[in-house]
Amino acid sequence: MTSKKKKRIKFVVCFWIILIFLNCTSRHGMAKCPTRMGSVFLPEHFSVIARRGSVTKFPENTIPAFQEALNVDGANSLQADLSLTLDRKVVLWHDWDPNSPMALIRQEKGEPVEKFKPSGPSLRESRWRKKVSELTFTEFTDHYGYEDKITHAKTNVKIPTLQEFIEWATQQDKLKLVLLKLKIPADESRLAPVMLEEIRRIIGGIVPAPRFQLILLTPHKEVLNLVRNQFDEFLFSYDRELPPVGIVNYHGFTTVPSAMDFKNSFASIGFPVHASLPDPPTLDPWLVYKFILTLDFRIRDSYKKSTSNYIKIISWTFNDEKKMRCLINLGVDGIVTDKPKMLRRIASDMGKILD
């Protein structure tokens, strides 16, 4: 047997040993977490990131939702979604295209933890069922908003502009970090510099300057390539969301190498949405997520040792206590959640610095 073949067999055996070990420590096994497979650089400061605010009480991406998340639910960080109107207004809105499959599901059912769902023109009113980028700000706000999932009553809570959000956020002493997800699709990446120019104008006009850290996230490398050099005053992150099935090359789904390539100081990795699949995945998605995350830790730790540069890893979206504890044990720097009150309690119990 050749040396090369022996190495290949050894790699396969080690891979499956690790996979079996992780499976035994998943929620379907002993509900423990393989801490020795985590980072050697465990962060002291930890980000409790409320996804789109307090969505169990207020419409997502609105000022009341963010206010509640910070002052009542205990978040120290926020995540919001950004879209761009035809007349270059940056608005806090998730669904760039109201006719996309995910947008249609959200309009019909909403999301499980949220009290409200997005509302817009009916399918028959095709004149206004356009991408946000094809509507003026007035047209968009006149025809889109939120409604109660149960009663279908329209809410009076307005869709905020980024200008309004930043002006509010600057006044929040508890706010440490803001993640802004650029919802620009890959086929409209030409609009990225337009949106970033408007973000630059808004941030530059705030006096005094915001004290919180601002991170711009995108899942599209085309967008990062267009803006990272032209807008080097901002911090960026490649926003990796794992697919629910079809992962064969685990290294191909790590997120830290992209952060290294783009010279980002943040990397984010999302847990796959798989509830709507007709057939369950052959492997537990949590098992796969943990394995890929541990690869990211090894790459990040080696990078830190060789360059002194530290890449913060953000995990999203988690609402389960056991998974939250596992991720903190492994060494993530922050978790995006719909349950910031629970996450804050857990992180505090585990000795993390939150304020």
Image: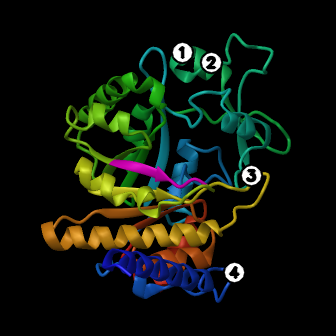
Q: Which mark is residue 28?
A: 4
Residue at numbered disc 2: 130
Residue at numbered disc 1: 134
Mark 4 touching mark 2, by CB under 8 A? Answer: no
Upstream in sequence: badge 1 or badge 4: 4
Q: Nearer the viewer, residue 113 or 66?
A: 113
The N terminus - image quarter: bottom left
Q: Which residues are magenta?
A: 237-243
* Viewer-side label of 2, 3: 3
Q: Is residue 161 left or right of residue 4?
A: right
Residue at numbered disc 3: 277
Image location (x, y in percent) of residue 169: 40, 46
How far, Cα to Cα, is label 1 from label 2? 6 Å
- Residue at figure coordinates x 62%, y 65% from the top left: 285
Mark 2 touching mark 3, by CB under 8 A? Answer: no
Image location (x, y in percent) of residue 123: 78, 20
Image location (x, y in percent) of residue 229: 20, 36
Upstream in sequence: badge 2 or badge 3: 2
- Residue at figure coordinates x 53%, y 55% from the top left: 242
Upstream in sequence: badge 4 or badge 2: 4
Q: Is residue 325 left or right of residue 127?
A: left
Q: How many neighbours does mark 3 have within 10 angstroms: few (below 14), some (14-19), or many (20 or more)?
A: few
Outermost residue toward the right in this view = 151
